[in-house]
Amino acid sequence: MFKRKKIEDFLTDKDVENNPDEEWLSDSEEGELTIDAYETEKEFVIQSTIAGVESKNLDISIEDDMLTIRGKRKRPESTEKRNYFQKECFWGSFSKKIILPERVKITQAKATIKNGILHLKIPKANRKTSKKIIIEDK
């Protein structure tokens, strides 16, 4: 099947510079972050290739059982004219929402970036909780 090319596939940096108000050149579209997510006995681990993103341009939050990772990858500055023959890198805002399968200890979550890979570790909350229910005689 023939795949239509997007207008961006034929753009040069000069085109972007000369037409900053064009809708199809804006950062309005948000990319989706790709991840690997797994669990160990004690924690959930999220990993993602996040090369080119500074930690100050990342926002990671957990609300109830929803983990949200948001960020922005800035296009490298260049003064030279570029005539792209292939353009696959995503530049701009991105996000990913993940529903965690269990309760977690939000305050103990830790995130690091090493060699362009985000590592997020979120400890599981104690699964087994019990409470003795006292029966009242009336």
Image (cartoon, rainbow, N blue to C red):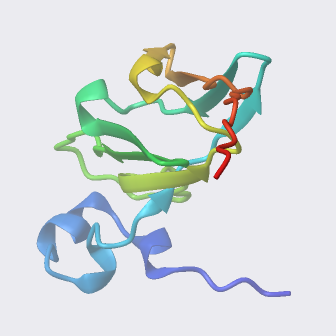
Where's residue 98, x and y in %? 59, 50
Q: Nearer the viewer, residue 73 or 3?
A: 73
Which residue, as the protein is rendered here, is positioned at the far front? Answer: 138
Total marks placed: 0
Q: Residue furthest top?
A: 114
Residue 130 located left or right of residue 64? right
Looking at the image, which is closer to me, 86 or 54?
54
Q: Residue 81 location, x and y as percent?
A: 26, 52
| Quadrant in which residue 130 is drawn | top right
Residue at the (37%, 70%) spot, across then down: 11
Counting from the top left corner in percent of width and height, residue 110 is at 45, 17
Quadrant (top left, top right, bottom left, bottom right) of the N terminus:
bottom right
| Residue drawn 23% across the image and 29% down it | 56
Q: Is residue 40 left or right of residue 21?
A: right
| Above or below: residue 91 compared with residue 60 | below
Q: Quick one: 132 or 121, which is closer to the camera?
A: 132
Relative to residue 10, is residue 103 depicted above or below?
above
Residue at x 62%, y 29% (from the top left corner): 47
Q: Nearer the viewer, residue 49 or 104?
A: 104
Relative to 134, residue 40 above or below = above
Image-quadrant location for residue 112: top left
